[in-house]
Every structure is written in C-alpha cells, then in structure tokens.
Image (cartoon, rainbow, N blue to C red):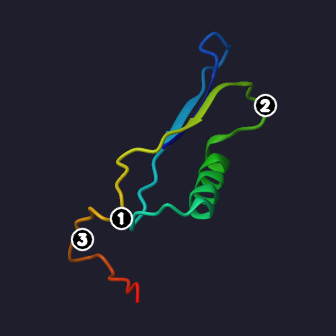
Amino acid sequence: MCFAGNSPFDGQPYYRKTLHQFPVATADSIVLSRTVTRLARDLFRPGIRFYKIGVGLIELQDCCHRQDDFSTTLVSTN
C-alpha cells in the first residue's frame, strides 16, 4: 500500500492511496522498489505540497508457510 496527501488545512485537500498485490510472495528488494516507484508516480501531482507520504507492507508471509492455489505457477528451486 502506498499513500500520499497534503495538509487537511490546505485549500484543496488531496489524499490518494493505492494497493498492489503481488502474484507470488517476494523478498526481492528490487521488485519491491520498482513497484513502489511505479505506484508513487500515480499518486503524486505537481503543485501539491505533500504533508504525509508512506508505504505499508501488509499481509506479509514467509516462503516456508505458503498455501498455493490452482492459479499459482509452480517454480522449481532445483
């Protein structure tokens, strides 16, 4: 989840958030950084003085305790 907003006391309040669900759990910092960068481009607007911005990682899971479903692509680790 990424969010950005200006001060509620500004003339035109602005607050946006966006969610991204990865198809497969990842701990790859490059994948995470690229995704957050893409999401941030969608949130930010020129001329707005942002007061609060952030990134939240939710529904975290480790790779050892994962339950696949029928749509999950199996990846061989051999």
**Residue highlighted by disc 3:** 68
Q: Earlier in the sequence, mark 1 or mark 2?
A: 2
Looking at the image, residue 18 sits to the left or right of residue 63; the answer is: right
Name which residue type carries label 1.
Cys
**27 w.r.t. 59: above or below:** below
Q: Looking at the image, is mark 1 or mark 2 nearer the viewer?
A: 1
Looking at the image, residue 15 sits to the left or right of residue 11; the answer is: left
Residue found 58% across the figure and 58% down from its top: 35
Q: Position of residue 52 (x, y in %)?
A: 62, 25
Q: CA distance from mark 3 to mark 2?
A: 44 Å
In the image, farthest residue toward the top: 9
Name which residue type carries label 2.
Gly
* Secondary element type, mark 1: loop
In the image, farthest residue toward the bottom: 78
* Secondary element type, mark 3: loop
Q: Looking at the image, is mark 3 or mark 2 nearer the viewer?
A: 3
Disc 3 crowd, CA 10 A, few/some/many (<14, 14-19, 20+): few
The tag on residue 47 is 2
Q: Quadrant of residue 76?
A: bottom left
Residue found 71% across the figure and 38% down from its top: 45
Q: Earlier in the sequence, mark 3 or mark 2?
A: 2
* Secondary element type, mark 2: loop
Q: Nearer the viewer, residue 27 or 3?
A: 27
Residue found 58% across the figure and 64% down from its top: 31
**Residue highlighted by disc 1:** 63
Residue found 62% across the figure and 32% down from its top: 53
Name which residue type carries label 3.
Asp
Q: Position of residue 34 (x, y in %)?
A: 63, 60
Q: Nearer the viewer, residue 25 or 3?
A: 25
